[in-house]
Amino acid sequence: MPSIVESVGEDVHELSEGDTVIPIFLPDCAECADCTSKRSNLCSKIPFEVSPWLPGDGTSRFTDLKGETLYHFLFVSSFSEYTVVDTANVTKVDPAIPPNRACLLSCGVSTGVGAAWRTANVEAGSTVVIFGLGAIGLAVAEGARLCGAKKIIGVDINPEKFETGKIFGVTDFVDSRSCGDKPVRQVINEMTNGGADYCFECVGMASLVEDAYACCRKGWGKTVVLGVDKPGAELRFRSFDVLHLGKTLMGSLFGGLKPKSDISTLVKRYMNKMNCKGKNNKPRACLEYAYKVYF
């Protein structure tokens, strides 16, 4: 959820008491080589890590009634009613945006839309395959649709998700449990006449990353990993295939978006009633429909 700044520290100049902000787990200091570059959203001054501490000094700002330490969560601790965060982890937004819409931009929607828009740079007329039609997968579909993708194939084990996916731009669906004797990668390669231009893994399973890589087209296909797998999970590819097939495999944390600048762009699009098509081709604001579907 967006938050209201209650107070600021002595050296904080970009925020003031009463500002509306969105806490975001991915730091953006706006100063280091990575944050000032268009090529990365991975801050080097405050690197992202799964840590129980506040970034910077490695301490906690929370205690319980007995004075014992309580731990932070992903730098923002957004499940608490009051929190303490570094300025790198908050983005100031238009206070007019409804809180229950703005919260979608703190992770899921931004990650999916950003992955198609920023990381993959999906081209108009292209073919996209999305493994997993959860919150992030649906947002990828929306991002790909906004970029002009011609064919968006959703892959999931729940066929009921196809109807939901259509709202966000999914044009075709593959139930990976109903492919018969064919592996899902073969089914998709046949549907796309040799492989998709872009594949997105949105579940967090090494085997699906490998399937996605096998489904993207030789020469120019891109596979983007968004799902969070279990610790220690490994990917296996043949060195020969990596060299000779000319494909790209890349990760995308927070969809490649820069919190300080790109979130404001998405908020403006929403506030300007950037429309997408819903059921019966009735135009709907994207976050409005995302909110109804997710919640």
Image (tube, rainbow, N blue to C red):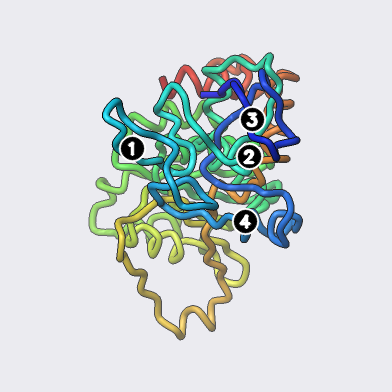
- Tell me residue 7's x, y (percent): 61, 25
Q: Secondary structure at mark 3?
A: loop
The answer for how far apart the CA atoms under marks 4 and 3 are is 22 Å
- Vertical placement of residue 59 versus 23, above or below: below
Q: Secondary structure at mark 1?
A: strand
Q: Secondary structure at mark 4?
A: loop
* Mark positioned earlier in the residue sequence (1 or 4): 4
The answer for how far apart the CA atoms under marks 1 and 3 are is 21 Å
Q: Is residue 63 left or right of residue 36?
A: left
Q: Splitting the image into 4 quarters, where does residue 14 fall?
A: top right
Q: Nearer the viewer, mark 4 or mark 3?
A: 3
Residue hosting label 2: 87
Q: Splitting the image into 4 quarters, where does residue 151 fall?
A: top right
Amino acid type of the residue tagged 3 in the rendering: Val
Residue hosting label 4: 43
* Mark positioned earlier in the residue sequence (2 or 4): 4
Query: Tag on residue 8?
Result: 3
Q: Nearer the viewer, mark 1 or mark 4?
A: 1
Query: Tag on residue 70?
Result: 1
Q: Secondary structure at mark 2?
A: helix
Mark 2 touching mark 4, by CB under 8 A? no
Q: Is residue 36 left or right of residue 55?
A: right
Amino acid type of the residue tagged 4 in the rendering: Cys
* Mark positioned earlier in the residue sequence (3 or 2): 3
Residue drawn at point x = 62 percent, y = 17 percent: 284
Outermost front residue: 67
The quadrant of the picture occupied by the C terminus is: top left
- Tell me residue 144's x, y (percent): 61, 42
* Mark positioned earlier in the residue sequence (1 or 2): 1
